[in-house]
Image: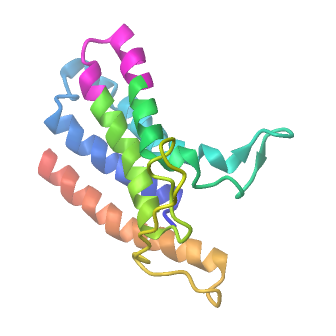
Amino acid sequence: MPTPIGHTLTAAIIYTISRRRCCLHKKKQLRQGWRSLLFCILLASLPDIDLFSISSGIRFSWENHHGPTHSLGFVLLISLIVSIIVGIFRENWKKWCLLSSLCVCSHVLMDLLVTKNGLMIFYPLSTHRIIMTTGFPFGYSPEMGFVSFVVMSAAQELVILGGILIIVWRRMR
């Protein structure tokens, strides 16, 4: 299970590459870079909004997790919303549309690789769950305990994705 740390680091990698490749680092935007980075992190974390149920007040629930918000349909919906909003206020809406798509899609892809119950990737066209569990970087075992698993996952994400972020950041400077 990717932790919020993994999704955050992946968003930072995408942002770092996009700063250079998509010209999102213009002088005016360079001063606002932290806002763009925060925007990427929020988008990369957005599919996990399904962890919160509002049926009887806002509460945390695992029941609906990995549902429709973990699909390509959701990626398209968020990209469309970002494009419309950014298009109203800025002229480079295509770049922000691509960036938002990559950030949300990164979350879906990371979860697809490790979620044992699969994801409804093609929702709303299909509710069939696609399972591609690789156990990367390692699989969960009941003997390990859930908390130990999350701590180990977060530590491995810090090492792997943190290392990638450092390499990408140094190459993009």
Judged left or right of residue 149, residue 102 is: left
**What residue appears at the point 36 percent right and 53 percent down from the top-left corner?**
10
Residue 82 at least partly seen: yes
Q: Which of 129 and 19 is in front in this view?
A: 129
Query: In this picture, which residue range is highlighted in magenta?
Result: 81-96
52 lies above or below 129: above
Image quadrant of residue 37?
top left
**Secondary structure mostly seen in the magenta stretch:** helix
Residue 120, image x, y percentages: 51, 53
Is 166 magenta? The answer is no
**What residue appears at the point 44 percent right and 48 percent down from the top-left corner?**
122
Image quadrant of residue 39?
top left
Residue 54, image x, y percentages: 77, 38
9 lies above or below 139: above
**What residue appears at the point 47 percent right and 39 percent down from the top-left corner?**
74
Figure quadrant of the C terminus? top left
